[in-house]
Image (cartoon, rainbow, N blue to C red):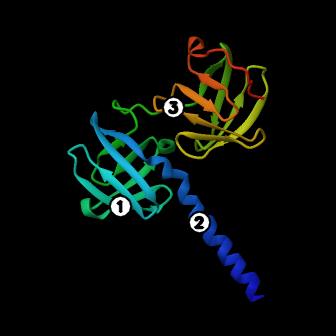
Amino acid sequence: MKKYAFLLFLSMLLSVSASYSKDSDLGGVWYHDGRETRISVRDKNDVVFVNENGDRATGYFTDPWHVKVPKWNVTGAIKEGGNSISWSNNTVWTRQPGGEKTHISGRWYHDNKPTWIEVHGDGWKFTITNEQGRKSSGEAKSARELYIPSLGITGHVSGDGNKIKWSNGTVWTRSPSGSGPLSAPLE
């Protein structure tokens, strides 16, 4: 019985730790009022923030959707699938300079043929329809990483939100002219 209880506790601990990885993809360039900021995620307890003035501070995740920066005396709520952070001092950092969020919903193209992505519920679940009309369900692992379990593939969304590079070698783009000939279709 003690062994079972220990394994259950260990399993719960590991699942909580794994949940922090969902937004560890926060690293990179961000913007506040059109000015560049930066985030570097080393792990859930060591996140470096650099504001638009170049001031640097270390913070940490309080849960997968919130960060705290003690030096600046602020907390941040991660929103819009990891594309914005609303800070407790009433400022907002976004992935894009103008504050536009990256949406994956809508029409895409592969080999100049239309495809489609429909996002469901809270924004973490989605359905793709490939160029042959086949549908598959997926889950966003972060703001930039998509996963389709039934196909065993991941997709990386570009910083501007206009291209998805799938692990099977295919590329989806927002415009038909952005797709070139590719040999491996998404199935």
Q: Secondary structure at mark 2?
A: helix
Residue annotated with mark 2: 16
Q: Secondary structure at mark 1?
A: strand
Q: Quadrant of the C terminus?
A: top right
Residues marked 3 and 2 touching at CB (< 8 Å): no
Considering only order in the chain, which callout, 3 or 1, is on the residue closer to the N terminus? 1
Q: Which three-letter amino acid code belongs to the residue tagged 3? A: Ser
Residue annotated with mark 3: 158
**Near-viewer residue (57 or 12):** 57
**Near-viewer residue (169 or 8):** 169
Q: CA distance from mark 1 to mark 3?
A: 26 Å
Considering only order in the chain, which callout, 2 or 3, is on the residue closer to the N terminus? 2
- In the image, is residue 161 above or below residue 148? above
Q: Which three-letter amino acid code belongs to the residue tagged 2? A: Val
- The residue lying at 45 percent from left, 33 percent from top is 101
Can you give x and y, in whole percent of width and height, for residue 148 in the image? 71, 40
- The residue lying at 62 percent from left, 21 percent from top is 108
- In the image, is residue 56 above or below residue 94? below
Q: Secondary structure at mark 3?
A: loop
- Dot 2: within a 10 Å radius of its alpha carbon, few (fewer than 14), some, or many (20 or more) residues? few
Q: Which three-letter amino acid code belongs to the residue tagged 1? A: Gly
Q: Quadrant of the N terminus?
A: bottom right
Q: Left or right: 171 with respect to 38?
A: right
